[in-house]
Amino acid sequence: MNIEQFLLAKVTDAVTALYGPVDAQAVQIQKTRKEFTGDYTLVVFPLLKASRTSPDATAQAIGEWLAANVAEVGGFNVIKGFLNISLKDGFWAAQFAAIGENFGQGAPTGRTIMVEYSSPNTNKPLHLGHIRNNLLGYSVAEILKACGHRVIKANLVNDRGIHICKSMIAWQLYSGGETPASSGMKGDHLVGKYYVEFDKHYKAEIKELMAAGASEEEAKRTAPVMVQAQQMLRKWEARDPEVYGLWETMNGWVYEGFAKTYKALGVDFDKTYYESNTYLLGKSLVEDGLRKGVFTRREDGSVWIDLTADGLDEKLLLRADGTSVYMTQDLGTAVQRFSEEHLDEEIYVVGNEQNYHFQVLKLILSKLGYPWAENITHLSYGMVELPEGKMKSREGTVVDADDLIEDMVATAREMSAATGKLDDCTEEQAEAISRMVGMGALKYFILKVDPRKTMLFDPRESIDFNGNTGPFIQYTHARIRSILRKAAEAGIAYADTPAPSAYLPEEIGLIKQLLDFPDTVAQAGATCSPAVVGAYAYELAKSFNGYYHDHSILKETDEATRAMRLRLSAQISAVIARGMALLGIEVPERM
RNA sequence: GGUUCCGUAGCUCAGUUGGAUAGAGCAACAGCCUUCUAAGCUGUAGGCCGAGCGUUCGAGCCGCUCCGGAAUCACCA
């Protein structure tokens, strides 16, 4: 039972004793805002009908009852119909002392949740948009684990289709056999280069054909590279050995490249699915849907669902030639996963451009009679925009993931060199810390924004290491760890020292903030929002910095107080580390 | 046009199930290193919460109508 529930029960007792039985809805308790003194606040307006007196008199009466009957209540004040209740310092101190090893880790819920994220195409390297996706997916998965769920991180690799064939045909025609080994280029970048190459040649051919009198549509259809790419797709589907071999080789290059980027980002997966294995799924569902009369077959043989009654459109599920589309595959994979993995819930981390797709997906699944359709969540994150506007690959305004990562790390390196704080470290140590800090800046910058909002990525601002940033929080952690090291060197033991007789208001405040951690994690999990954890870690770090500035920890002369301060600091650094870990951010011992 | 989402300080963003005087950071200005790491701390300034109605004891938050912006409405994925 948490503190709020405890107090709510006591307040309900008070109200019942004073005014008789009252609707539970009318007893509203919340944390007291910072501007006022008190820990929890009872809003008395909803109780006025029962009390039949003024707001202030009601609040006063309840406050007096609580002060007299609840040992933990230390005092209260009444302001304009708000009863602010303060709990005794001793109560908070006892709560602090009771913090255990797995603080913030929720009890097992028995629920299994799959989080699908990343889901890249294998024809080009990852960019800034993918970074947001990957960071979000990883963090949400970690947060859900901390909430006590069993989590499966899944990646669905889009490794087949015409866009892959575009890179392949361009490589065959224009590369002269270039490989990652021969060029020294990262595999995903090399393949991406030929995807761009395809587009260049394709455009040129269209222009040529149109100059020769073809219509635009005709030119697009008959351009030789495109025709060859389509031939290649048909050969791939027929498992032509040569095409299939090339496909495996080039995808292999891409996977090597992706592995490096994923490692740099610190994300991982429990399961990797490939569309080349799953793209035929869902056809049996189509038969099922036809039998149930949910789908209809047209004269040309194509299969559709009419969703106009639900305010949507008609949707194709099977082409006239019997091949399936994206929706069909997604229906199939969803059904397969829920049954094979015994999922209670699935969260798709996919950009908001696919809102319509997921709306339709859920609707179709529920029409097919799957009760778990409502347990599908589309974590629909907003686009990342640049100061110049949207990222457009054709205009060369995409921010490449690998470049961005290296820029951030380089900036961190320069910053460390400028302060000279890492001068006595080894090269390897300094590099590891720079990487931690650079990545911390990048990850925090992206994750501190509410996922579903479109966000602006300003490179200048992202590289700022002051204020509400990852490095600020990491720095607080490093300073605390430094104090704890110094305490250990001086042989100061603090773990088992008895609690002091008195606490400063700031210390009680820090204890309260610490105790909020489990609720914060639960809220972040319920809303799929790493930003909630980020804001918490920032506030905690900020409070500690103020405290640290005003009060010495190691120089405190009272032994019990010094020990308590060390315990408090240690606990804060641990919670910062845990919170940041939920965002995929590491914290250094020094920086 | 239909559907979904967004409009809060100059800029980037917070703002719990409706609660008190709407908060941070950046940028600007003014201070604080002989003292546990100044990647820090303190202060000043900055607001018709897009607009208007409504719901009620109370609205940045809920409802309706506008205005402005985004995404989507493919036999692409």
Image (cartoon, coloured by chain):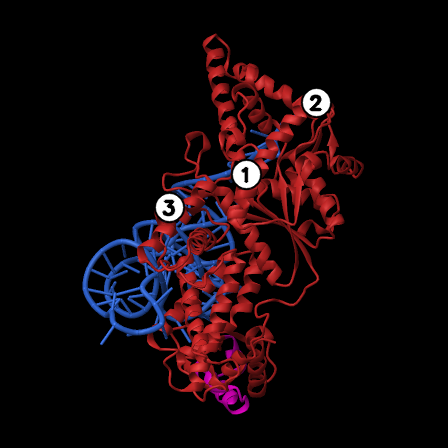
Chain to which the residue tagged by mark 3 belongs: A
A513 or A409: nearer the eye?
A: A409
- Dot 1 crowding, Cα within 10 Å, few <14, some 14–19, many 20+: many
Instruction: Tell me: A273 left or right of A480.
Output: right
- The picture quadrant where one finds residue A539 is bottom left
Q: Secondary structure at mark 2?
A: loop
Q: Nearer the viewer, mark 1 or mark 3?
A: 1
B44 or B77: nearer the eye?
A: B77
* Residue that lies at the very extreme toward the bottom in this rendered image: A68
Give the label on residue A257, or none.
Answer: 1
Task: Give the mark nearer the N terminus: 1 vs 3.
Answer: 1
Residue A561 visible from this viewpoint = yes
Give the answer, above or below, for where A289 lies relative to A521.
above
- Residue type at mark 1 is Gly
Badges 2 and 1, same chain: yes
Q: Colour of chain B?
A: blue
Point 47% across, 71% down: residue: A572
Q: Which chain is red?
A: A
- The picture quadrant where one finds residue A172 is top right
The part of the chain drawn in magenta is A46-74
Magenta span contains residue A51: yes
How many numbered marks have been drawn onto this rendered protein structure?
3
